[in-house]
Amino acid sequence: MIRRYQNTIFLTLLLALASVFSVADAQNAPEASEEGKRVYEKSCAHCHGTEGRGDGSAAENLLPRPRDFTRGLYKIRSTETGQVPTDQDLFDIITEGMPGTSMPGWDTSLSANERWEVVAYIKTFYDGFKENTAPRQIDLSGKIAYAEQSIETGKALYTELGCVECHGNVGRGDGTSAPTLTDEWGFQTWPANLAQGWTFRGGSETEDIFKRFIGGIAGSPMPAFEGDSFLHFGLTSEESKRLTELENKDEMTEAEDEESAAFYEKMDAAVDIALRITEGETLNAADRQSFNNAMKVVYEKSWHLANYVKSLSPEKRPEPAIGNNALRSQYIGGELPTLGDAAWETLKASYFPLVGQVILEPRQFNPTIDSVNVKSFYNDNEVAFLFTWDDRTHTTASEDEETGKMLEDAVAIQFPVKVPQGPTAPKPYFLWGGRLPVYLWYWKASAPEQVTELTAKGISNAEVQAVQSDLQAEGTYTDGQYNLWVKRALKTDDKKDLQLEPEVFVPIAFSAWDGANGDVEAKRVISSWYTFVLEPVPSSRRFIYPPLVALLSVGALFGLRGFARRRNS
């Protein structure tokens, strides 16, 4: 019976939502002109194509593919589902770009007038803009404040609505459906990593997230939240909770049967009103209010879910590991913590951004790994690192059907063989060295407890060291995230190894491969050189000075007391 409600409401809500959305302001773009065409063909056509079909010369190398403007399917809008975006929506995307894609912001490259001219020209690719000159905007007036109770409610809805199937248990985009998702054009697409709000293409504020729920992301697998998205459409939250209790009973009393029937009758009434709206019937005030009340619950739940999604990500993107944020290994006197030890929670991670390697073939234009976070401890003899990075899939030794090459998740941590003496001293080439060699730790997902030492003089000129140090390693993959723990002696007997000393700043860089994204060999994500340092060993004087000062203070007090007594006598 519930499925009947869902299927019926899905067909009716496009028109019904008109009663709860406001009308957009008049469109702002000028009439289409030759100037708009000129700017578009110069700056946009190489990706979107001269006819706006998303088939420009660069399109084949991009994921997600450039927008096909001729279909009128726009992902980021402030308007309800089925509506075209406002001119301001288009202008904002051109201005700010689309994080996590190849679409840059054009605010510094094109003047405001040029951007408005492009908006006008883009609209000529789809006749729907002529037919819908005042698209209905999503109503944000019922916003629910960001608070712990709302977040908890949204967390339950995240599971109830099936968000976990695409976005994963904790939102890292690693759901069971994630590798199989395709867009309207049949191209592979990935669900958002909800733990990285800085990659949200329409903004990461609660209002932005709510718009994605209510309006959907057109052309993608992300649907709009309609009445059929939620259980027990037509009931209040309290009534829905009560009906769930009744449905979970093995047997109901006669009174409970009547109570349950009344709930189903109310849901039937909401569906009936939705059908009448679809048929163009004018509703009386009571029916209109009944339907608005039913939809109000949908919006309330959407706000709770938006607050929960907001809670999964930091307020802003972490600062890169430079300056005060550089990786600083902390000294401890005893054994170094192992993977999973609570001691790691006492450290703040250093954030190392990663980008696609596009200098040499094969290039990676569509990276899926955004960054790696690192923490470190050391003692008198050893150093331990904890490397953490997000990856939507766990890929171990999978053969590429096209090339026959083995694809696998992996990471390489890069150091110079010899630490440069001073900040201006030359470093090896950051792409795995050159004339100056680099020393590498290479780890792959199929051997989670093994790190191999390499020496490289170029990205295609790496050799496994004949003598391997006693590196200890442990890697795990949970909920879309890798954690790799590595421990090594500060000093080794191998001249090809990096030798570590406290208070010496050491260059460090990273490469990472996502096997499910086709990463292999030079096709990977990389970082430039950053630095890390073993913090100075804390002086034992800090344990001596406090009690010494206390003793001197007590002695001084007794001395003053004796002096006062002698003076008085």
Image (cartoon, rainbow, N blue to C red):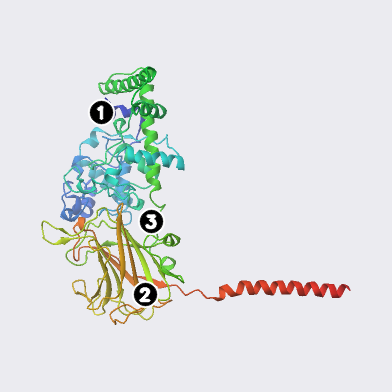
Q: Please tell me which residue is depicted at 35% across the width and 25% down the height of the picture.
A: 234
Relative height, residue 88 to residue 516 (above, below) = above
Q: Please tell me which residue is depicted at 71% across the width and 71% down the height of the picture.
A: 554
Q: Residue 393: image x %, image y %? A: 24, 53
Relative height, residue 509 to residue 499 (above, below) = above
* Amino acid identity at mark 3: Arg
* Amino acid identity at mark 1: Arg
User: How much space separates mark 2 and mark 1, taking CA atoms?
Assistant: 61 Å
Residue found farthest to the right: 569
User: How much space separates mark 1 and mark 3, taking CA atoms?
Assistant: 41 Å
For marks 2 and 3, give the one nearer the viewer: 2
| Quarter of the image where the C terminus is located | bottom right
Q: Secondary structure at mark 1?
A: helix
* Amino acid identity at mark 2: Val
**Horizontal side, residue 184 vs residue 75: left or right:** left
Local crowd at mark 1 within 10 Å, few (<14), some, or many (≥20)? Answer: few
Please name the residue that numbered disc 2 is placed on. 506
Q: Secondary structure at mark 2?
A: strand
Q: Residue 266: image x %, image y %? A: 35, 21
**Horizontal side, residue 537 vs residue 199: left or right:** right
User: How much space separates mark 2 and mark 3, taking CA atoms?
Assistant: 25 Å
For marks 2 and 1, give the one nearer the viewer: 1
Local crowd at mark 3 within 10 Å, few (<14), some, or many (≥20)? Answer: few
Please name the residue that numbered disc 1 is placed on. 3
| Quarter of the image where the N terminus is located | top left
Residues 7 and 467: in front is: 467
Sequence order check, earlier mark of 2 and 3: 3
Whether pointer 2 and pointer 1 mark residues with C-beta atoms closer than 8 Å, the reply is no
- Give me the disc on residue 317: 3
Relative height, residue 367 to residue 84 (above, below) = below
For marks 1 and 3, give the one nearer the viewer: 1
